[in-house]
């Protein structure tokens, strides 16, 4: 069995029977919709080039036919039902529509729009995303999405390859803010679901095992570029690559292992050294570590270690010729800051062009609006300089100031062998402003207190732990890989904190003083 399929399991006799596998025999099982009134299965869906829904009864078939007439050219999702099944919330979205939510009366066959998720964004200015296929050098068919800029002939365009993160994930048809932003600036955007992506069956996923960097996963990106060059769509002299997490690694690998392909690259929280990446996985991520060992390798295995070194862009930094922009969150527990620091230092010492943005209040990717705006302004200027697309030189004073804050003088970057931040000296009197309760989750608070001039944190129902200062507003724990960034106004008032752990971040507003 290659594709994930839906089965019905009987716990009494331990037997299961097949309910459904993809009718097109192309992708893994996607999901189900059950009746709230009867618990019966009423729909299944699959995500191929686009989302496909299969009604399991006549009522839902009628519903779906009505919805498709009322909402053409969008993907439809039934997000929830009332207990009597009469009313449903319907989400509609497309490549040029970030999404709208409707109230659907199934009995009366009426549809009422509740809201648009991005009403200020006119669809007429957005670019269509096309599913495409191309053949990799070993004959494997690679599914991908191609977005072409509006108003330009599809010939000799600057191209940006945008590999997804994970890598055990996939891109899907629909609205993507970075895709649309780059297309608006005049770039063709290629998003390949390279081998190792999920959703296309076990064989396609396993084809990516140990194939990072110098293997098939990276070749699939290179072959996609060549396909678009052969089609006359892409200008071979103006090809860039940009991605986050694994996509950031693929950016570094593209520049290091295929330096003749790319004219510029931007890596967001991308690991540069696979050995230090694997060695930085904490013990409590045991399940994730076993996945990395299976699909990437074991640095304690001598033969794996040799291969991992060869697949690490850090050890081939001298092959990088194109300008590189590196973007990192200082609190990233998944891809440590050291991964970005070391490639910046290596390129700087080689005299190669490299730019560095570092956000002290971000983790595995940027979440805060001001940081995203500053990063995007830097990206569009960077790619315009090296690939020739459009960019907006003007920006608000706030964004300009934040961009200056994030921009690192590369001459000041050092490679710190320690995985923990350095503890700085602070006057303990400053700790009093942080004391209080912070609402982390609906049923969980984090209480901050001071004991014997030491800042202590304790979450509801959990052990207390000490916090050590990395700056006046940033603290870290020496257990559980936790770091905390307090939100402090210019006047010194504390409004909340962001807790970073295990690749996730949680904002907790301050709810009371203690």
Image (cartoon, rainbow, N blue to C red):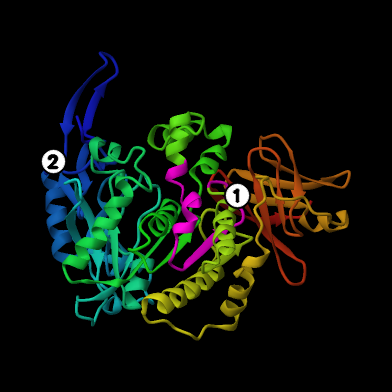
Q: Residue at x 36, y 80 (%)?
A: 388
* Horizontal relation, residue 509 to residue 239: left or right: right
- Residue 492 lies left or right of residue 6; in this view the side is right
Q: Are marks 1 and 2 in contact (CB under 8 Å)?
A: no
Residue at disc 2, secondary structure:
loop
Magenta segment range? 309-334
Residue 121, picture quadrant: bottom left
| Mark 1, residue position | 500
Examine the rendered structure and indicate whether residue 45 appears above or below residue 113. above
Q: Does the magenta run of residues contain 314?
A: yes
Residue placed at 42% from the left, 56% from the top?
256
In the displayed structure image, the side of residue 332 where residue 125 appears, left or right: left
Give how far across and how far down residue 331 sits, in percent: 61, 53
Which quadrant holds residue 83? top left
Image quarter in which the N terminus is found: top left
For label 1, the SS is strand
Q: CA distance from mark 1 to mark 2?
A: 41 Å
Residue 38: horizontal and vertical position, in percent? 25, 36
In the figure, 443 relative to 66: above or below? above
Of marks 1 and 2, which one's residue comes earlier in the chain? 2
Residue positioned 24% across, 58% down in the render: 224
**In the displayed image of the protein, which residue is found farthest to the bottom?**
394
In this picture, residue 276 sits left or right of residue 222: right
């Amino acid at each position: 069995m290659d594709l994930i399929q839906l089965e019905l399991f009987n716990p009494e006799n331990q037997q299961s029977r097949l309910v459904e596998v993809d009718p097109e025999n192309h992708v893994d099982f996607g999901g189900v919709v059950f009746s709230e009134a009867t618990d019966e299965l009423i729909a299944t869906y699959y995500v191929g080039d686009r989302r496909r829904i299969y009604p399991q009864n006549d009522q839902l078939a009628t519903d779906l036919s009505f919805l498709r007439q009322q909402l053409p050219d969008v993907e439809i999702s039934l997000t929830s039902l009332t207990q009597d099944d009469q009313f449903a919330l319907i989400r509609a979205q497309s490549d040029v529509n970030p999404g709208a939510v409707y109230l659907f009366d199934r009995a009366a066959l009426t549809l009422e729009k509740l809201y648009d998720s991005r009403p200020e964004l006119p669809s007429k200015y957005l670019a269509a995303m096309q599913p495409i296929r191309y053949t990799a050098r070993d004959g494997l068919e690679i599914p991908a999405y191609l977005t072409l800029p509006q108003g330009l002939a599809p010939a000799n365009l600057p191209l940006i390859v945008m590999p997804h993160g994970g890598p055990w994930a996939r891109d899907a048809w629909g609205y993507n803010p970075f895709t649309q932003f780059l297309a608006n600036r005049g770039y063709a955007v290629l998003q390949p679901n390279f081998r190792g992506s999920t959703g296309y069956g076990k064989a396609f996923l396993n084809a990516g095992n140990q194939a990072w960097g110098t293997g098939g996963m990276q070749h699939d990106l290179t072959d996609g570029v060549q396909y678009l060059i052969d089609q006359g769509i892409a200008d071979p002299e103006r090809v860039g690559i940009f991605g986050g997490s694994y996509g950031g690694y693929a950016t570094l690998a593209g520049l290091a292992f295929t330096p003749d392909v790319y004219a510029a690259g931007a890596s967001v929280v991308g690991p540069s050294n696979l050995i230090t990446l694997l060695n930085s996985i904490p013990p409590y991520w045991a399940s994730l570590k076993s996945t990395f060992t299976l699909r990437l390798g074991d640095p304690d295995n001598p033969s794996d270690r040799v291969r991992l070194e060869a697949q690490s862009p850090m050890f081939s930094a001298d092959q990088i010729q194109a300008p590189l922009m590196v973007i990192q969150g200082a609190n990233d527990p998944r891809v440590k800051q050291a991964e970005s620091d070391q490639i910046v230092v290596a390129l700087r010492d080689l005299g190669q062009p490299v730019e560095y943005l570092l956000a002290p209040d971000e983790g595995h990717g940027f979440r805060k609006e001001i940081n995203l705006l500053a990063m995007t302004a830097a990206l569009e200027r960077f790619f315009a300089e090296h690939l020739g697309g459009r960019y907006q030189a003007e920006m608000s004073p706030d964004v300009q100031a934040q961009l200056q804050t994030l921009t690192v003088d590369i001459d000041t970057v050092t490679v710190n062998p320690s995985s923990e931040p350095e503890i700085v000296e602070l006057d303990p009197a400053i700790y009093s402003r942080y004391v209080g309760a912070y609402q982390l989750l609906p049923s969980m608070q984090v209480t901050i207190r001071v004991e014997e001039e030491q800042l202590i944190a304790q979450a509801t129902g959990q052990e207390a732990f000490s916090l050590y200062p990395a700056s006046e507003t940033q603290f870290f724990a020496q257990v559980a890989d936790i770091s905390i960034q307090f939100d402090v106004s210019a006047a010194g008032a504390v409004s909340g904190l962001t807790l970073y752990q295990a690749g996730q971040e949680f904002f907790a507003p301050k709810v009371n003083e203690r």
